[in-house]
Amino acid sequence: MFGENNTAKENYYPILCPNCNRQLTENGICFDCGWQGSGITESQLPPLEIGKLLTDKYEIRQVVSTNYSSINKYIAFDLDEEHNVVIKEGPAVHDSEGRISSLREDSLSRSLRQKQGIQTDFSAARPTQLLEEGFEQDIEVYRPNPRLELEYLLLEEVQYPTIINALDRFVVEDRSYLVEEYVDGWTLREAWQAEETDRIQQFDWLIQLCQALSKLHTAGILYNGIHPDLLVVSEDERLALSEFGWAMKLPLSEDYEAEDNYYTAPELILTPDMADIRADLYSLGATWLSLLLERPLKDEDFEGPFLPKLPTDIQPNLHPEINRILLQVFNRDMEQRCAKSGEIMNEGKLPSQELQEEILELKKELRIPTLIAGGRTNVGASRENNEDSYWIQVASAGNEDGQSNNGIFIVSDGVGGAMAGEIASQIAVQIISNTLSPILTENVVSDSYEDNIIPEIGNAIKTANEQVNAHAQHTLGLPVGKMGCTITVAVVIGWDVYVGHIGDSRLYLFTEGVCYQKTEDHVKKSTNMLEKAIGIKRSVEPDIFSFQIDKGDTLLLCSDGLTDYAEMETIEGVVLKNSPPQEACDTLVNLANAGGGGDNITAVIVEAGN
């Protein structure tokens, strides 16, 4: 029943009426328009020689395939436009192969073409002559190959960025030609498995495929060519539907014959006259599963003919949402493939559009980073009090793009000695975290959130400065400048990091194995004393900036107790080892203590992944 066939579809094309493109009966009669003849024969056309010039414009450069259901395929060079094209070649139809009544041609074939919505006009290939009503006469002239002519007309009808363009068609002697856009790139399977391809790009290709299918389905066209080794990804990462040799206008006739393989919807084999556009969804599901498995489908992936196993039986660790979608589309029962028949007919809802929306939502969910954080603070080996403080908060906030994993991460190092520094860092962390928390817990994130977050961080730090000064003066009786702290705060919204910084605590970014210090120490080089910190002056102007992170990146926020007593090379080695963040923080604190531990030590590590 099943068989993998990536390169040829023998006997796939039905024999079509040369006059109206409908299927002929076995004895060569078209009941739609009255044609009587054999239509297209299955004889092989000898391939053209390399260098052959067609119409003084197209130079044959490469033979791609021959006898492909009586269609030869070439790559040629367009001498006028100076780029490659694809040329398909099939036997032209000689009118002496059949006889047709001029009366039936005028009435039946015209009305049939109008009913199908396709304007097929072969009159230009016929000699001009007047025929009496009802008179039959052999017409000695070659016509375009109906299969290629239908392909040309379908492509003309559905021009779309991810669908190849039909460029030209002509007849030379007994051969018919169709010229199509050439897409230079890779098969979808090759592009999908490329090392540089991430999951987001894979979802983009699936979405582009759904968009192209929606365009075809709106026109009542069944693409019937979805296969991981037939779809093409161009050099600019655009998915292209490049093979329209199997596309057909719906409805299909009951004697329609489709190739029986792993990617073919069961109704195309069992009840083709009942098939509709949802047959393409079955092929999409089969293709998606094959790509996820990184191998062609096999008999072992099916319980029986057209009865796929549960996706999780084949790949147990499959993402639950991907599993749910595959259960829908890669389903023997076409009524289960997203939209129901009633919705398609009565509401005009396309299942490909519904599938596109579901994949888009899944892409958004997976595009959001999963933030994993750990933190540790320690008094050190020499100090009596720990004046450092830190804050870790990860939450999901609703926004216009769906759910986001966002976070607020703060490290503060108290200055002033005794209890003053400890209180200052605690006040600052509490004020800043309370001010910024609504960003994570309320629906305040929108397309313009950057305009809101930057001022919020600045206001939070300035408010913390005011509160620390007030507590020093009115509670402890200390003058301004005798109680303070550093602050480094990172607000992570999706893949954007917004930083507020004052003092000599630090923020590092580790990306692709390289460490970058993102903050600048506010220290006078001559005295090694802080020149900017919370509580040192009545007003402060913190550094505020933003940058983007990517999957796999790591943030390290730390006080100078870590960087002063542990070598930077050692710190980098610990972080880049990709240990769980909490374990890495504990290791860093132990290393600083082993290096002397002359100050309080604090480390917060945040990993961004999917």
Image (cartoon, grey):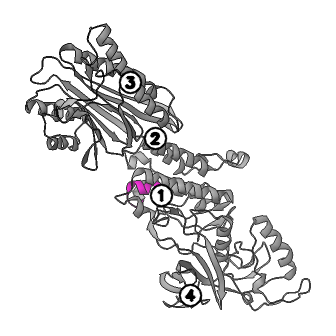
**Magenta stretch: includes residue 214:** no
The residue that mark 2 highlights is: 365
Question: What residue is drawn where x is 61% and y is 47%?
Answer: 335
The residue that mark 4 highlights is: 45
| Distance (Cα) linking label 2 and label 3 | 35 Å
Point out residue 554 in the picture as x, y percentages from the top left corner: 29, 41
User: In screen coordinates, is 135 left or right of 60?
Assistant: right
Question: In the image, which is nearer the foreground, mark 4 or mark 3?
Answer: 3
Question: In the image, which is nearer the foreground, mark 1 or mark 2?
Answer: 2
The front one of 137 and 348 is: 348
Q: Are marks 1 and 3 in contact (CB under 8 Å)?
A: no
Region rendered in magenta: 288-297
Question: Could you tell me the amino acid type at mark 2?
Answer: Glu
In the figure, 189 relative to 56: above or below? above
Where disc 4 sits, the SS reads: loop
The residue that mark 1 highlights is: 287
Point out residue 511 in the picture as x, y percentages from the top left corner: 29, 47
Question: What residue is drawn where x is 16% and y is 41%?
Answer: 568
The residue that mark 3 highlights is: 462
Where disc 2 sits, the SS reads: helix
Question: Could you tell me the amino acid type at mark 4?
Answer: Leu
